[in-house]
Image: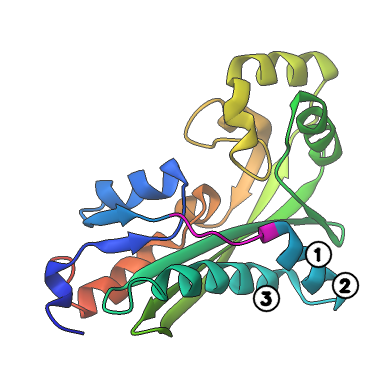
């Protein structure tokens, strides 16, 4: 891949949080959201009883592959996040009602948050990584959930668990076991290690 260190990393995601993480870490980023039907892919994999870790990896791979076909001479990063609780996979809430239902279901329990990333170059995967965190949600009253969602607004629909750990979402938890960046949706430290080896960030 010619002059790869001089080319910004392409992020195949519309996630403002992932973009901000990379930029804050000193990575040059260009955003090109992938046009893939995430829910259709997820439903197909669930029907085949694929494990949550592999679902996250497959979704990240599909995003990176889709954009890499348009930019074969660039490194393309795809990422995805899966929330699993009691063998159930949660999807992003689409409205206030489903967001309240999600938070009610998570209340007083622990769940797994799995973040996967895949990097493509020259039309093929050149790196992949998956990390997970255990999130222990405190008991949430209906009043708190309503107040929380009122304050968060549409931002509650951007993350699979309706929470933003960097903001008001910190109030949801008793305990978190795992990497902070995993919770935000990207195994950032592992991504940075790969990019250093490519000469895309300083060593």
In the image: residue 143, left or right of residue 115: right
Label 1 residue SS: helix
> Label 3 neighbourhood size at 10 Å, few (<14), some (14-19), many (20+)?
some
Residue corresponding to mark 1: 43
Label 2 residue SS: helix
> Coloring scheme of the render?
rainbow
Tell me, for residue 54, which label it has, or none: 3
> Label 2 neighbourhood size at 10 Å, few (<14), some (14-19), many (20+)?
few
In this rendering, the answer to whether 72 lies above or below 182 is: below
Instruction: Tell me the magenta residue range.
Output: 33-38
State if disc 2 and disc 1 touch (CB < 8 Å): yes
Residue beneath the point at 61% across and 68% down: 59
Label 3 residue SS: helix
Q: Position of residue 25 (x, y in %)?
A: 26, 52
In this rendering, the answer to whether 65 lies above or below 133 is: below
State if disc 3 and disc 2 touch (CB < 8 Å): no
Instruction: Please check the rendered image and state whether residue 173 is part of the magenta-colored stretch, yes or no.
Output: no
Give the CA distance from mark 1 to mark 3.
13 Å
């Amino acid at each position: 891949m010619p002059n790869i260190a001089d080319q910004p990393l392409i992020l195949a995601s519309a996630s403002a949080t992932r973009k901000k993480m990379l930029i804050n870490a000193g990575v040059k980023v260009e955003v090109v959201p992938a046009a893939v039907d995430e829910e259709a892919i997820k439903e197909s994999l669930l029907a085949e009883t694929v494990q949550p870790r592999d679902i996250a990896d497959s979704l990240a791979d599909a995003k990176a592959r889709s954009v890499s076909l348009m930019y074969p001479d660039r490194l393309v990063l795809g990422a995805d996040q899966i929330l699993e609780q009691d063998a159930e996979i949660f999807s992003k809430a689409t409205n206030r009602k489903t967001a309240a239902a999600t938070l009610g279901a998570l209340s007083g329990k622990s769940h797994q948050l799995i973040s996967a990333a895949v990097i493509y170059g020259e039309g093929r995967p050149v790196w992949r990584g998956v990390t997970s965190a255990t999130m222990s949600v405190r008991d949430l009253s209906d009043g708190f959930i309503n107040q929380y969602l009122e304050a968060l607004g549409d931002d509650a629909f951007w993350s699979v668990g309706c929470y933003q750990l960097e903001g008001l979402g910190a109030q949801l938890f008793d305990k978190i076991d795992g990497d902070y960046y995993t919770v935000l949706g990207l195994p950032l430290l592992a991504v940075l290690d790969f990019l250093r080896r490519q000469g895309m960030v300083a060593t």
